[in-house]
Image: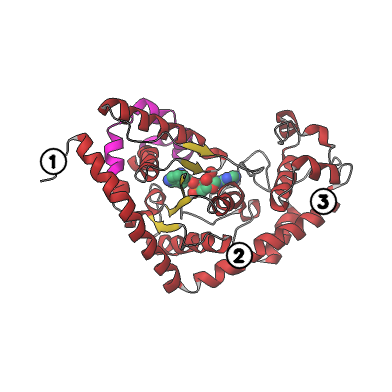
């Protein structure tokens, strides 16, 4: 059986990118696998978080998991800070990972921006904690969006180096699961930028808590171009848009990709349906589809956020089950490394 691990940061609004790129896949993977889904609050504080907001957002991400359909009885849902073994293993990995490896991480470069000297040291070693999150459960498969691929390659390197250094076959070499049509959802305002909770413009994203009116307005106002919609020849054999089409018409590519993902249909079939039509017709249908899916999840999320006692009980139970899995694995790591446990 595969052991699935993944996480989402409680550092901003959950949006359509998080849903299509990650959370929706968490739900499908539950059927035949052993799944652990984490709200990674320790990752969130690598950038400043207001404490009251962090608590609120931790509950919100938990509510998002539940509203999307993760079953807290079969899967484990918890917040990272409640299972000490993550940070404990991360320290060991700080001593396994090489500075040269971390220097290549593009997310650090993006998030630290021009003023690297002022970035927290946590932001720099963030990928080591991410490797610990997964490997403290000996996770084998990790569903994520495209932008986390480099971090998972680092996780593989860390596992391999640990195994080599200590002459053991201890950690598995994880497989990224980058699934579905929408592994990289772009901004609704600028199709060349990733949809992100840190974008200053709320119109750039559909938040999982947006109500029907907000979703409809954002779809209507989404940037488009002046041409008619293309024919299916722009879809490659891999079922995705060809790179030159994406470059030439990023907004058309993004909106059609989102539509295909939301309706669970092949991209080529969707493109075929809209071939030669204008954006006005397309957006009318897209509004209906987006409101149908996201509106429902948003309403359910709101209901749960209003019941913090329930959300907290899910996290408490999840943390207990997670600790029971992680603690024995960490103890074995400590033995391998040579930490005396008198
Ligand atoms: P985070 O919180 O930024 O994003 C959570 C998940 O959403 C995906 N995602 C997207 N997918 C498609 N299009 C987008 N525009 C988009 N934006 C976000 C992300 O790829 C991710 O899967 N480092 C991770 C959290 C993490 C983690 C882990 C993940 C910590 N430990 C261990 C897996 C395993 C992060 O910052 O994701």
Check the image and report above or below for 25 versus 82: above
Magenta region: 89-118
How would you rate the neighbour count of disc 3 (Cα within 10 Å): few for under 14, some for 14-19, many for 20 or more?
some
Measured in 3D between alpha carbons, the distance from the residue under mark 3 to the one under mark 1, in whole angstroms, is 65 Å
Taking 148 as reference, is 295 left or right? right
Q: Report the residue at 79% width, 45% height from top.
A: 270
Query: Where does residue 149 sit, x and y in percent of width and height?
Result: 51, 35
Residue 143 horizontal/vertical position (percent):
52, 44
Q: Main secondary structure of the magenta part?
A: helix
Residue 317 in magenta stretch: no
Judging by the rendered image, the residue that carries numbered circle 2 is: 298
Check residue 282 in the rendering and tell me which mark sits there, or answer none. 3
Residue at figure coordinates x 43%, y 53% from the top left? 38
Question: Is residue 276 something one can see in this rendering?
Answer: yes
- The residue under label 1 is 340
Q: Which mark is residue 47?
A: none
Q: Gap between marks 1 and 2, in whole Å?
A: 49 Å
Q: Position of residue 39 (x, y in %)?
A: 43, 55
């Amino acid at each position: 059986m595969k052991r699935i691990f993944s996480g989402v940061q409680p550092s901003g609004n959950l949006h359509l990118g998080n849903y299509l790129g990650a959370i929706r896949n968490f739900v499908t993977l539950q059927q035949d696998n052993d799944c652990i889904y984490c709200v990674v609050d320790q990752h969130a504080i690598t950038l400043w978080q207001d404490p009251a907001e962090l608590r609120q957002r931790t509950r919100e991400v938990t509510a998002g998991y539940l509203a999307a359909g993760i079953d807290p009885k079969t899967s484990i849902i918890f917040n990272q800070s409640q299972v000490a073994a993550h940070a404990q293993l991360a320290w060991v990995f700080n001593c396994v990972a090489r500075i040269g490896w971390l220097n290549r991480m593009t997310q650090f470069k993006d998030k630290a921006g021009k003023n690297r000297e002022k970035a927290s040291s946590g932001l720099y070693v963030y990928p080591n904690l991410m490797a610990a999150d997964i490997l403290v459960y000996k996770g084998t498969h990790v569903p994520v969006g495209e932008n986390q691929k480099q971090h998972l390659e680092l996780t593989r390197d860390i596992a391999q180096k640990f195994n080599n250094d200590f002459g053991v076959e201890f950690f598995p070499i994880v497989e990224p699961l980058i699934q579905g049509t929408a592994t990289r959802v772009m901004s609704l305002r600028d199709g060349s930028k990733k949809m992100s909770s840190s974008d200053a413009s709320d119109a750039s994203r559909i938040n999982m808590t947006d109500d029907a009116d907000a979703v409809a307005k954002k779809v209507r106002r989404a940037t488009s171009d002046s041409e008619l919609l293309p024919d299916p020849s722009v879809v490659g054999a891999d079922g995705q848009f060809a790179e030159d089409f994406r470059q030439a018409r990023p907004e058309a590519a993004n909106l059609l990709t989102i539509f295909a993902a939301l309706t669970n249909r092949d991209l080529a079939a969707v493109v075929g349906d809209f071939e030669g039509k204008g954006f006005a017709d397309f957006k009318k249908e897209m509004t209906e589809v987006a409101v149908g899916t996201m509106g429902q999840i948003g309403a359910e999320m709101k209901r749960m956020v209003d019941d913090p006692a329930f959300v907290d009980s899910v996290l408490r139970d999840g943390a207990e089950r997670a600790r029971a899995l992680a603690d024995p694995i960490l103890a074995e790591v400590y033995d391998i490394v040579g930490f005396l446990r008198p």
